[in-house]
Image: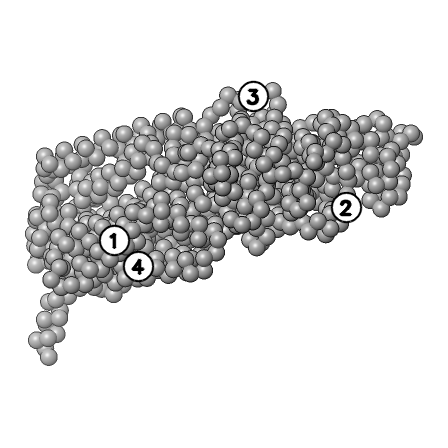
Amino acid sequence: MNLENRKRELAKEFSPMLEKTSNASKILMGFLIAIILVGVYAFFVQLFEGHIVTGMRDNVVWGVYIINFIFFVCLSYSGAFFSGILHFIHTPWKNSVSRIVEIVTVLSLIIGPIFILLCIGRLDRLHYLFLYPRIQSPITWDIIAIMTDLVGCFIYLFLTFIPDLAILRDNSENAPKWRQKVYKFLAIGYQDTPTQRKKLHKITGALSVIIIALAIVAYSVLAWIFSLTPQPGWNSSIFGAYFIIAGLYSGIGVIIIAMFLIRKYYPLNHYIRKVHFMGAGMVLLVISLLYGYFTFSEYFSRWFGHKIHDAELLDTLFTRYFWMFIFANYIGVLVPVVIIFFKKLRTIKSITFAAVIAVIGLWYNRYLIVVPTLESPYIPIQDTREEFIHYTATWVEWSLSLAGVAAFILFFMLIMKLVPVVPMSGIIDYERKQKKNKKSLNKL
Amino acid sequence: MENKKTDKGGTNRRNFLKLGFMSSVSAVAGASLFSNLSLQDEEEVASGGDKMRLLTPDGKIVEVDANNVNNYPEALITPEESRKGIPNRQFVMVIDLAKCKNARKCVEGCQKGHNLDYHEEFMPIKLMQDSPEASPYWMPKPCFHCDEPPCVTVCPTGATFKRDDGIVLVDNERCIGCKFCMTSCPYSARLFNWGDKEKFHNTTMPYSPETSVPHAEGTVMKCDFCPDLIRQGKLPYCADSCPMGVIYFGDKNEDIVTNGTETVSFSKLIKDRAGYRHLEHLGTKPNVYYLPAVNRQFPLERGFDVKEDIIDRYKNVPYVQDLKQQGKI
């Protein structure tokens, strides 16, 4: 059968990527594992010596950890959002990128919450959240939102994996036994019959819509952790929407970077093409404009209103945090806008560069939302201990942050070893549809 | 001018509270605030055994059955019991800024009472200057025990709670250390135990949220209005140790506050002295009132008669910067 042949062909094409590991990637993996191990060591240092080993103190009670938390979780929500949209409106070129997006979603949703756990002083009492839950607390909302989202995203990701796993199960005679077993188990008896295919499409389609809604709810709840407190830099009605846009901004940025790296190190040039970068670049442009607009509105209204505590906060931002502010809120927005706006500047490399700037800028934007606000409370900090006045992250915090990034990359590589990063079933679906279109064109 | 009358020891003032029963009507009225809390003192138990003579807030003497009076034992109040609060009370604090001279006795008394370290202050004293032209003043800042406490709303486990008597407490056996309460408190009233300390393992006294002792690593602590002392008919450590009588403590229900030397009507005091609450516009409805620093008893500079590192805290206040420029500090 033609279809079976095509499946075999695709399986053959992708199998080297799954089964062979180049020396370079082995070294990279080793390096990533080393970073993660340093992070694990730092974690134990913090566990045994207490939070005193971090830079957090009574005024800045949340530091780099919560910034990483919102960064990763927002990344995940935006992944879910994009993935849902790609599925929902059947974007013609979605096949090449949809799996990257889905992997980004699930990985960041696993890594993000780890950072909030690092913020918690008594990990041994974590179960109290369920023993004595209080529904009034935005943290409880957040736990519900994240857990729902995690389950939803997992199911969704798994559903999109099934057809490929089935193809691999049927076409990996030469693969090691354990691999065959894993594929067989994970494919849960999917045979790609027309009814099965139809059902699966239906469920995935429905889930994609649910996931978009979930992402928006979860984003907003995350923003409310900040904006529902009476603090000068946080108590803002714009925060929910602002976080959604900021999350999408980092999301599309990371997706572009991932596309670039995958294209560079794997022979997938004919799948991930310039058109994808152009498309993603356009999304980045639109979101960077929106994000810039939100950032501007947020700070502009604070500046124009010049309430005393807002004014103090802005004063800190423009003195102590001047360069960070410029980088996060000017360079981080304007560079991507300029690069992508002019057609001449639009190349794969420049778009990736814009994405890198956007992602780093956004991380610093989060930093500026969290730390300076905590450093300028309503009642002035009158203390002589420098670490209680200004926050500086310690090596423990940095190494755990790096470990998070390393874990993200490592797991990404490992998932790419399990299933092709470009969904084979998607390619087949696409070809089938094109054939149909041709046929209907011929009939006309 | 230093008020010589107030220059008594702390114990005297506590005794004063108890002796209030036998004193003139106004003083008796003040003592009755704590009357049914301090009945373990023999001198206050009227003859007859089962019957007790008590004073009502409006100055009438009534006889009640001793069994009807809450006779709080000095025994430990467990975390579960501490959630209830002392019945029919609405505790309130009034801080008279006109009398404060940054003597730091409240800070030290509180630190001693709560077994706190040098830098751990439930009641820091801030040097406030609302604008560069405005007159600076010393502001002791306890927890405000708000009626709309943002910290309680956001707590995910109910480790911090609002009691019927208005006190907001932290149960550090329930606290998971997420610090959300600290970020949502607009008054920076809360402290976190960042690392382990030897004093946390002092098991001679079992933990009670009412004493806040011993503290625990990775949990939040704060000013607790000393409900353990209130139950014994005493004033909180800060009010008790202030030599100037800056801090009045009392019950809104009975409309009485006392600083140990004088007992006054809460509403009248607030009315006459234009009492206010800090950052009223935030809508947290604090239970700590301030009397503005007018007709001060001491010049502000008296407050700089403290350790060098304490003075150093205030270096960003415009007034202190002026003083430094003039070479006065």
Three-letter amino acid code of the residue under disc 1: Ile
Three-letter amino acid code of the residue under disc 4: Gly
Quadrant (top left/top right/bottom left/bottom right) for the N terminus of chain A: bottom left
Q: Residue at x 73, y 47 (%)?
A: B269
Q: Quadrant of residue A31?
A: top left
Quadrant (top left/top right/bottom left/bottom right) for the C terminus of chain A: bottom left
Marks 3/4: CA distance? 54 Å
Three-letter amino acid code of the residue under disc 2: Ser
* Image depth: mark 4 or mark 2 in front: 2
Seen from the viewer's position, the closer of residues A320 and A410 is A320
Find disc 2 in the rendering and name its residue: B265
- Marks 1 and 3 in Cβ contact (< 8 Å): no
Seen from the viewer's position, the closer of residues B301 and A427 is B301
Q: Is residue A142 above or below residue B102?
A: below
> Please, which chain is the residue tagged with disc 2 on?
B
* Image depth: mark 1 or mark 4 in front: 1
Q: Residue at x 89, y 41 (%)?
A: B61
